[in-house]
Amino acid sequence: MKLSSLQRRPPAFQTDRPTPTPEDVTPHSAEEEVSEGAEDPELKLPKRAPLLIMITAYALLQISFFIIVSSSNDKIRSRQALPRLPITGLSPSQSQSRAGGYKIPLHISCGASLLGHILYALAYRFSFLYLILIGRCVSGVGFSLWMYGKRFCADPRLVGIRRRTTLSACLAVSLGLGTSLGPFAGGMLYKVGFGGRVWNGYTAPGWVMAGVWAAFWVLAARWYEDEDCVIAGAGTRAAGVAPLDTTAPEGQDIALQETDASGAQPSPLPTPYRMTPQQWGVVLCMCWFSMICFFILGAWESNLPVFGASTPRLHWSPTAAGNFIALGGISAFPFLILNLLLARRTPDRHILALGTSLGLSALLTFLLLLLRSPARLSYPVLFVCWWGVALGFSSATTVTMSTLSKQLPPVWNGRTSLAIQYSNYLGRVTGAVWGGSGVAVGMRNYVGLQIALVGVGAVLFVGLWRDLKTKTG
């Protein structure tokens, strides 16, 4: 080979192609980037063990809340004098433990739930009815983990923007599990329970759940650990994380940006984030739907045993009422799994619209039956109505927290989770009261109020339709 030909040959690292510009680069989908090994922040998920622990704790809280529903009325009657009072959870303060971690609230919830169930079970043994009230108050401290569970699944430091609705759908599945397994287990324990002073049909739910919480507490202490990004941040800025960009376009998630941690001068503090009237409207809309969903679910849970026992054609015992409530939850469970699978591709506002429409259709059907022929209300017809209510409004709870986390800055996650959980608590306690008094005030009035509340939400939803648009997933 001639030397001249070698000299004319270009080096291997040189190319005749022009340098590509940003416009020439073909954009890749998020799935393609992940498959090539690049971590897409929009698809980020927490570690598996902490995620499973939090979802399991959420489900156990649902079971703890509902397991006494089927037998609580008879238990209080057997002890006399004290009316049945629903006890709501005690909400924690806005400041997160360990600067943004979830481990301490998890342990507090486990300990409070364990002690609360023990006190509830001892009420019959000591013939002291106020122990029921004290036990549920102590359990209410444990119910505060509901807020932390929602915050965990929407925490922008742990969960990408396209995975928050999916994880919220997991919580909806836990809600369905608690709605079905709790009353069923309570009804079965009431029927099978022995006749002793310590262990009987009234105290068995408390003892069983105390054992379950003790075992779960051991597992949580062994396997749960806060991730570094969580511990680094609640009120202060984490190392290597820049201030939030408060000038991001409206309706988009404002992500944390990495900076050079080699000792560069920190950026100036950002100006306070100011919400627009449309964003305040979205917050009001999500809090309203959060409240009415749990109001209606809690009202039906507490009303079905009373309504079934007072209706001659049904004449339910606590066991039969628990089985009926559980059957509706179990039959809705596969559809909640389907909702979990579709959450990655379905916009949040569509999920809210479909779930609320299904629940409203069930309420209207039930009201129509009450107006036409209440005496002919049969088991299958009542079951269809309960199934529609359980599935529809459980699905609608999927998007209340995830929608706000996608539209507001990450530093607002604690405030929005607190607002949503207060709405949940308000719905639970008022719904339980309204459901327990449904027969006394009239079943038509009982259902009519629920329809009116959904109607107010529909007005908010239609008026804010464009502002409710967020990324899917």
Image (spheres, rainbow, N blue to C red):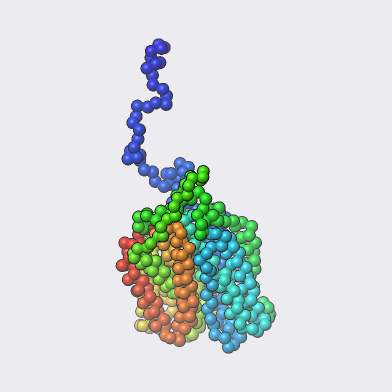
The spot of residue 236 in percent (x, y) is 51, 57
Q: Tell which of 122 and 470 is nearer to you.
A: 470
Residue drawn at x 42%, y 65% as measured from the top left = 400
Residue drawn at x 35%, y 59% as measured from the top left = 469
Q: Quadrant of the N terminus?
A: top left
Q: Tell which of 38 and 208 is nearer to you.
A: 38
Q: Quadrant of the C terminus?
A: bottom left
- Where is 116 relative to 96, above or below? below
Does the rendering let one see residue 465? yes
Q: Tell which of 248 and 428 is nearer to you.
A: 248
Residue drawn at x 44%, y 52% as measured from the top left = 268
Residue drawn at x 36%, y 79% as measured from the top left = 368
Badge count = 0
- Residue 298 lies left or right of residue 369; in this view the side is right
**Residue 276 is drawn in which quadrant?**
bottom left
The spot of residue 423 in percent (x, y) is 45, 71
Does the rendering let one see residue 166? no
- Where is 85 relative to 292, above or below? below
The spot of residue 373 in percent (x, y) is 38, 83
The spot of residue 363 in percent (x, y) is 39, 75
